[in-house]
Image (cartoon, helix red, strand yellow):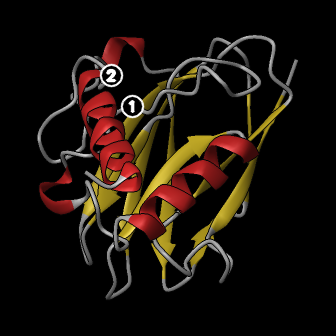
Amino acid sequence: MNKSILAALFTLWSVSSLAAPGHQADGTQQPDEAKVDRVIQIEAGEMMFGPEALAVAPGETVKFEIHNSGVLEHEFVIGDRAAQEEHRRMMREMGGHGGHGGHGGHGGHDMAEGEHGGDMPAVTIAPGATATLVWTVPEGISQLEYACNLPGHYEAGMAGKIDFQG
């Protein structure tokens, strides 16, 4: 078997096995509303996110409500620059939608080699749909980014910064 195909299959297996508890087959989480500190509305349009930057506090639990106002499928992935680049590479190798069919490919990505470790929360959002993602901000980090890593989307501007307060 080709090494890149084997690596892609292993990545899909790893991603599925590392999915965070509470994720559903459609890539959303059922949040425990009592534990959510803040709700942030995100718009995923054609090659843009609004807002373009966020500020969060370590330990804060944020519920993202991401609405796809465009006509293309998008994803919302939180991670450091290196993890985002690796995810984009994987998406290109898998033809752009590897692991996204049925939304089973998202939920958590291993970021143990990233600067902060942990998982890489993500959801895929169909055109016209809204997805939710609940994330607790890790300690000891100065900056992450959110991005759509479908081929060409990040390069067209679908990314934003997450800065940390306190």
Is residue 31 placed above or below 109 in the rendered structure?
A: above
Is residue 48 placed above or below 12 in the rendered structure?
A: below
The x, y position of residue 95, in whole percent, is: 34, 73
What residue appears at the point 32 percent right and 54 percent down from the top-left corner?
5
Of the numbered discs in the image, which one, if any, rests on residue 18? 2
Using the numbered discs, state the Cα–Cα distance from disc 2 to disc 1 in whole angstroms: 6 Å
Q: How many marks?
A: 2
The x, y position of residue 77, in whole percent, is: 50, 48
Between residue 157 and residue 131, name the one nearer to us.
157
Mark 1 nearby-residue class (10 Å; few <14, some 14–19, many ≥20): many
Is residue 31 placed above or below 123 in the rendered structure?
A: above
Mark 2–mark 1 CB contact (< 8 Å): yes
Image quadrant of residue 2?
bottom left
What residue appears at the point 43 percent right and 66 percent down from the top-left corner?
93
Residue type at mark 1 is Gly
Is residue 121 placed above or below 70 in the rendered structure?
A: above
Q: Secondary structure beneath disc 1? A: loop
97 to the left or right of 115 = left
Between residue 150 and residue 134, name the one nearer to us.
150
Q: Secondary structure beneath disc 2? A: loop
Which residue is the site of mark 1? 108
Of the numbered discs in the image, which one, if any, rests on residue 64? none
